[in-house]
Image (cartoon, coloured by chain):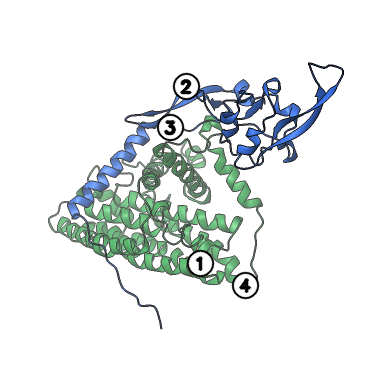
Amino acid sequence: METILYLIAYPPLWQVLILGFVGALLVAMVAIWFERKAAARVQRRIGPYWASPRLGGFMIIVADMIRYVTQQVIIPTTVDKIAFLLTPVAVLVVTILPLAFIPLSPHELYWPVASMEYSLLIALALTTLPPLLTVVLGWASSNKFSVIGSLRESYVITAYELVAVLAILAPAASTLSFNIVYIVEAQQPVKWLAILNPLAFLAAFLAVLMSTSAFPFEIPESEHEVVAGPYTEYSGILYALNMGGGYIRRFIYAIIIALVFLGGWAPYTPGLNPFTGFIIPSLIVLVKASIVVLIMSFLRAVYGRYRLDQALDAAWRLALPLALLGLGWSIILAYMNLI
Amino acid sequence: MPARVSLKSLKRRGGLFEGIKSNIQALAVGVKYFIDPQRSTLLYPKEYIEHRPGYRGFIVLIKDKCISCAACARICPSAAMKMVRVTEVDPKHPDKPRQKQYPVINYQRCIFCGYCVDICPTEALYHTPFQDVVYESLADMFLTLEAFQLEPGRPSVSEGSPVVYEVDEERGLIKRRR
């Protein structure tokens, strides 16, 4: 019986299906579809519809993907060819990399990273890599719009990565551990850090929204000012890699937020066999992360786009003090043994 | 001499409390529309707009009423209407053919202002209440005298249902089914 269960819930397979490339792709597709549909609802339109009326037009995302794959890839003569072709692939690889250090199950048997002491720190450090490659991307294109776009990207990441890292490390200060599993277990059953420490949660949410250049705040690739920012020269599959990379990066941040602030698998106590110990906890985390991503997508419909100076102003005057307050409050939480 | 650069700064409106309040209000409006969407999109082939009488759509000629005064061709601001000379049978003298001028229209140029319909002294021109007609080529849009007398067909009527757009006091522009 135990063997059959183990075969059905074979961990490496589910790690690929739930969290690996396929899962990330699915989440990116659903996020794009929901973004268009939610914005249409709020703005009194219908959004994608005719592609498949029963599914609410979801098939238009598949059609878009087919279009991206079969489109001609144009390589301008002025670009740095090796960097131009390799960077989008590198962006996607580096974007998925943090998933290797995020445990979704407390058992070392099913998720070997579970007992790693510094998993939160390493995962956070890896999430800050892709923006650097975006700067390389703009530089390799050798186009004025691309260079301006990557300059903006570097401004935004300098401001918001700091806030994101500070705010997401606040739970580590209150639980006195960098181990994600330990942080999650400390939040059992409903002592979620989003409730105990809303300041850090808000700062982390804001910083993730800004630093992944989610739609209303897509300062580096603003259409009206710089054509598509760092991605101006890209077409076809290479553009799709860049665009999907942004959504996957947001999803990974959402997983970290769901684990660290929203209690991970918290109301549920994982058992020992593969189903109760591995699949159910990871699905709970996935659902929480998806809700965070969908809320971020919904904000597109409500907010207008920020100018660069407004965004930087909000970062240094509002988000950074918020993150520092959150860090201080989490130290107070640790000192008073509230968690 | 380089351009002089001066930094402009706008005075901040409200304080922290005002900012939080307005953000929450914006989110509340968004959530309200997300839960209760008030869509006004026209699902075009399945629905069509039923226009009110007096709508300036396609123009049709009633040949028997025309007195060849050419007022429509003269008033036309975009020179879309032209008079053509036609040889036809005179009803009073059936044995003697006569020459008469009739208007024809070029829909490449027409702006649907309706001046020709307004100025016609015998009401020989009238508007159809729709505009959604498709031509296969640009040459087809230059109507002949025979085509100008026919009312063009409207395919969306046979496929879809009529809707009406109305202005509501509270909700703004709304779509209502007939």
Chain A pictured colour: green
In the displayed structure image, the side of residue A219 where residue B105 appears, left or right: right
Same-chain check, marks 2 and 3: yes
Where residue B125 sits: x, y (%)?
63, 26
Give, as a three-letter code, the residue at label 3.
Answer: Arg
Residue corresponding to mark 2: B177
Residue corresponding to mark 4: A78
**Badge nearest the viewer, 1 or 2:** 2
The alpha-carbon separation of the residues under discs 2 and 3 comes to 13 Å
Q: Is residue A42 above or below residue A237?
A: above
**Badge nearest the viewer, 4 or 1:** 1
Of marks 2 and 3, which one's residue comes earlier in the chain?
A: 3
Query: Tag 3's secondary structure?
Result: loop
Give, as a three-letter code, the residue at label 4.
Answer: Thr
In blue, which chain? Answer: B
Give, as a three-letter code, the residue at label 1.
Answer: Phe
Whether label 1 touches label 3, CB < 8 Å:
no
Q: Around disc 2, counting alpha carbons within 10 Å, would you say few (fewer than 14), some (14 to 19), or many (20 or more)?
A: few
Residue corresponding to mark 1: A145
The alpha-carbon separation of the residues under discs 4 and 2 comes to 56 Å
Q: Chain of mark 1?
A: A
Residue corresponding to mark 3: B39
Front residue of this view, candidates B139 and A133:
B139
